[in-house]
Amino acid sequence: MAQLGADVEQLDMLSRKFDEEAQKIESTISTISAQLGQTWWQGADAERFRNQWEGADTSTLRQVVQRLQQAGNNCRAQAAQQREVSQA
């Protein structure tokens, strides 16, 4: 018979890893945005590129950040539930 459950310390570590990776992406967005703002580039291609980055690209990356944060929250919730069950 298979045993069910989880190693709560590993779930805690996994949740922290999700949070760390989400923060790295947020930092990357900020770094690239700052560098793009400091880059001299004029013309239609530059405007199109900046609009794409500031619009769809950063939006997509922020969605990834949210998904990573949600996954981290789910791992924390699972660890908490496992602790409750184990204490009962």
Image (cartoon, rainbow, N blue to C red):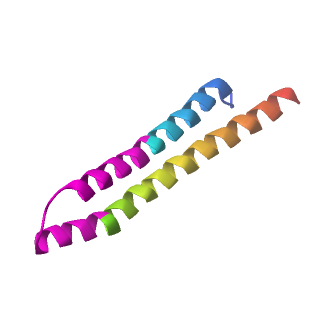
Depth order, front residue of 67/54: 54
Q: Position of residue 33 (x, y in %)?
A: 31, 55
Picture quadrant where residue 46 is located: bottom left
Q: How many labels were placed on the picture?
A: 0
Q: Is residue 87 left or right of residue 45?
A: right
Picture quadrant where residue 49 is located: bottom left
Q: Position of residue 16 (x, y in %)?
A: 56, 34
Q: Is residue 5 magenta?
A: no
Residue at image position (47%, 44%) is 22
Can residue 2 be seen at all in this image of the molecule? no
* Quarter of the rendering occupied by the C terminus: top right
Q: Position of residue 56 (x, y in %)?
A: 33, 67
Residue at image position (60%, 26%) is 10
Q: Which residues are magenta?
A: 24-53
Q: Residue at the far bottom: name it.
A: 44
Q: Is residue 7 left or right of residue 19?
A: right
Taking 69 as reference, is 59 above or below it?
Answer: below
Depth order, front residue of 52/31: 31
Dominant secondary structure, magenta = helix
Residue at image position (19%, 72%) is 48
Q: Is residue 11 left or right of residue 45?
A: right
Taking 88 as reference, is 58 above or below it?
Answer: below
Can residue 69 be seen at all in this image of the molecule? yes
Q: Residue at the far right: name it.
A: 88
Q: Position of residue 9 (x, y in %)?
A: 64, 24
Q: Is residue 33 left or right of residue 83?
A: left
Residue at image position (12%, 70%) is 45
Q: Is residue 46 magenta?
A: yes
* Quarter of the rendering occupied by the N terminus: top right
